[in-house]
Each structure stands twice: as C-alpha cells, then as structure tokens.
Amino acid sequence: MLVLSRLRDETIMIGEDVEITVVDIRGDKVRLGINAPTTIAVHRKEVYDAIKTENQRAASLAGNDLDSLGNDLGLRIEGRTGVAMRLRDAASSVGDRSSSQPSSTASARPRARLAR
C-alpha cells in the first residue's frame, strides 16, 4: 500500500484522469474530493462490497429463479435465451412507470465514481 501525506487543498493524481483532493480535515475525519471520469465508478468500500455481493448473487440465479422473477414482472420466459434482455426491458418499463412519482430520497448531487 502506498501511503502519502497531504495537507488541506493538496491533490493526489491517479493515472491521467483521477484527482483526489483533501477538502477538509476535522479531528480524525478527512473529507476527500474525487474528480474522475463518469466511466469510472466511485463508491465507499462498504457500498462497493455490497454491490459486488449482490452482483454475484444475481449472477448465480438458477433457471427456476429466473422464471420466478419473470413471473413477478409479468413475463413468460421460455428457456434462457434472451432472458437478460427480457428482464431488462421489463425492469425498465417498471422503472418508467415509477419514475413519474417524485422521490423524497433523490439527491441533486452527482454520484461519485471509483477507480478500480
């Protein structure tokens, strides 16, 4: 692990595209500003681990689980060919219907991205 010391308002570069700036230091907490391309996901470690675990769980769904999920979405799925596309299309149509509802948890702040 590389360990660097930085003062407030100093920046660390990762590659050509990622800048990490020390924004504030209060007691034992350090606030970092991360400037990275939108193609790079940035998450806190605990969020990244949760996403990774959920993706692994979803990837290991058995055929019966896919049929059950399709039924829940109102789809009739025959075989595994095109299942992901059909589920994606169904999920996006469900999202389209629900997106007209205002969300109290919506944030105006853009989501951060993390270098892998």
Image: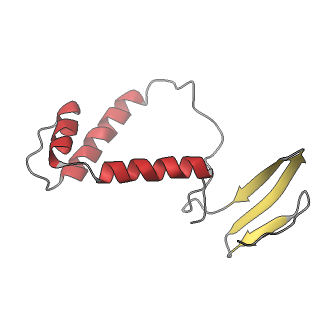
Q: Residue most toward the front?
A: 1
Q: Nearer the viewer, residue 59 or 10?
A: 59
Colouring mode (rainbow / by chain / secondary structure / one colour):
secondary structure
Q: What residue do we see at 52% from left, 26% from top? A: 103
Compared with 26, 60 (above or below) is below
Q: How many labels does the image show?
A: 0
Q: What residue do we see at 85% from left, 46% from top? A: 28
Compared with 108, 15 (above or below) is below
Query: Where's residue 14, x and y in %?
Result: 70, 72
Q: Nearer the viewer, residue 87 or 66?
A: 66
Position of the C terminus by quadrant = bottom right
Horizontal side of residue 16 vs 50, given as left or right: right
Horizontal side of residue 32 vs 64, given as left or right: right
Query: Where's residue 24, x and y in %?
Result: 87, 49
Q: Which of 15 and 49 is in front in this view?
A: 49
Horizontal side of residue 79 vs 93, given as left or right: left
Compared with 113, 27 (above or below) is above
Q: What residue do we see at 62% from left, 35% from top? A: 107
Query: Where's residue 63, x and y in %?
Result: 16, 48
Q: Residue most toward the left?
A: 78
Query: Where's residue 60, x and y in %?
Result: 28, 52
Compared with 19, 30 (above or below) is above
Q: Residue most toward the bottom?
A: 15
Position of the N terminus by quadrant = bottom right
